[in-house]
Image (cartoon, rainbow, N blue to C red):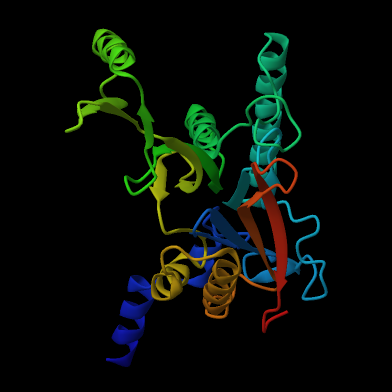
């Protein structure tokens, strides 16, 4: 009876050899990304192993855990971060090919006369590549190699610029008053050009018209996207997990994440959820780094810029 029970357990549960033969978990590694209020945090670990054997840890809690970690990539001409988990060699080749492809497209756009850089005060004279466009490019790159795929699961995070209308309230709409003749002219122009969606003429009791013009503003909205090795995208407005500890990460992130977290709170929540999940998985950990992408206002011209901060966390298994 005992022999039959042992055989049943061996057949129903995957063995260590079967788990180690999986290309996506052979080298270990985990990634967790969380969204906050105009900010995004992404955490990665530093362990590189061959199955159960740990080869290197990339430093510990002495401030060197984030140096030279190939699992996080700062893409050219963009404030977007790309992290990946999976087979180490495929991940290195995937990161290099993605960076080269983006650089080639930027050079081609510059040669055709399109502006480079960013208009948000970050040092350029054009627009930077947004995270949504980069996620589509990554998905296309992975699907194009479906016959000989990269055994990686990338995660793309960043802040995208979105134009939204101002909430209607006292002083949120521009009130323009004019003479009756000017108002009639303006009303005819509005009706002729079909601009009633943005402007509206309201008659008042004193026979004077008030033109209400809706105001729009540009905000920075978090964007989180994870894909599988064939490029199937999965976006989320809360958090995205990837790697060998993804099951534990889903549990801790679901329990700790809250909407509209500020930058410092987001780093603390993301780091606590990430470290708690790593302590429950032997193929991850040995150093963790959290990168915070947040929008800040420039003191010179008042425009919004994007800055990326790095926080090194201490783990018990360092």
Q: In the image shown, does 200 or 166 lie closer to the viewer?
A: 200
Q: Is residue 192 left or right of residue 61?
A: left
In the rendered image, residue 66, in percent from the top left (x then y), is placed at 76, 61
Q: Residue at x 80, y 55 (%)?
A: 68
Q: Is residue 113 left or right of residue 208?
A: right
In the rendered image, residue 303, in percent from the top left (x then y), is placed at 65, 41
Q: Residue at x 70, y 47 (%)?
A: 298
In the rendered image, residue 243, in percent from the top left (x then y), is placed at 53, 60
Placement of the N terminus among the 4 image quadrants: bottom left
Q: Residue furthest front?
A: 206
On screen, 35 above or below 118?
A: below
On screen, 3 above or below 12?
A: below
On screen, 266 above or below 129?
A: below
On screen, 165 above or below 316?
A: above
Specify the quadrant of the image occupied by residue 49.
bottom right
User: Would you say residue 152 is visible in this rendering?
Assistant: no
Q: Is residue 139 left or right of residue 167?
A: right
Specify the quadrant of the image occupied by residue 79.
top right
Specify the quadrant of the image occupied by residue 264.
bottom right
User: Would you say residue 266 is visible in this rendering?
Assistant: yes
Q: In the image shown, does 52 or 47 lie closer to the viewer?
A: 47
In the rendered image, residue 159, in percent from the top left (x then y), is placed at 55, 45
């Amino acid at each position: 009876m005992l022999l039959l029970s042992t055989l049943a357990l061996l057949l129903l549960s995957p063995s260590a050899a079967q788990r180690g033969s999986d290309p996506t978990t052979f080298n270990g590694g985990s990634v967790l990304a969380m969204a906050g209020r105009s900010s995004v945090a992404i955490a990665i670990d530093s362990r590189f192993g061959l199955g159960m054997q740990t080869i290197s840890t990339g430093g510990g809690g002495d401030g060197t855990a984030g140096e030279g970690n190939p699992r996080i990539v700062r893409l050219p001409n963009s404030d977007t971060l790309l992290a990946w988990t999976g087979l180490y060699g495929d991940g290195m080749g995937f990161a290099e090919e993605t960076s080269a492809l983006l650089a080639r497209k930027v050079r081609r756009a510059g040669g055709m006369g399109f502006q480079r850089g960013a208009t948000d005060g970050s040092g350029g004279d054009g627009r930077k590549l947004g995270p949504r466009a980069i996620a589509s490019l990554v998905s296309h790159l992975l699907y194009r190699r479906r016959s000989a795929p990269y055994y990686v699961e990338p995660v793309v995070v960043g802040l995208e610029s979105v134009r939204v209308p101002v909430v209607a309230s006292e002083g949120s709409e521009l009130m323009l008053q004019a003479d009756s003749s000017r108002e009639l002219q303006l009303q005819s122009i509005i009706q002729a050009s079909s601009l009633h969606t943005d402007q509206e003429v309201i008659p008042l009791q004193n026979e004077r018209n008030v033109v209400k013009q809706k105001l729009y503003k540009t905000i920075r909205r978090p964007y989180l996207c994870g894909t599988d090795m064939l490029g199937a995208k999965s976006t989320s407005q809360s958090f995205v997990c990837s790697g060998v500890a993804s099951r534990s990460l889903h549990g801790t992130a679901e329990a700790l994440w809250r909407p509209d977290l500020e930058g410092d709170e987001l780093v603390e929540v993301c780091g606590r959820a990430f470290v708690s999940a790593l302590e429950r998985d032997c193929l991850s950990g040995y150093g963790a780094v959290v990168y915070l992408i947040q929008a800040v206002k420039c003191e010179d011209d008042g425009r919004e810029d994007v800055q990326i901060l790095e926080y090194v966390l201490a783990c018990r298994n360092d």
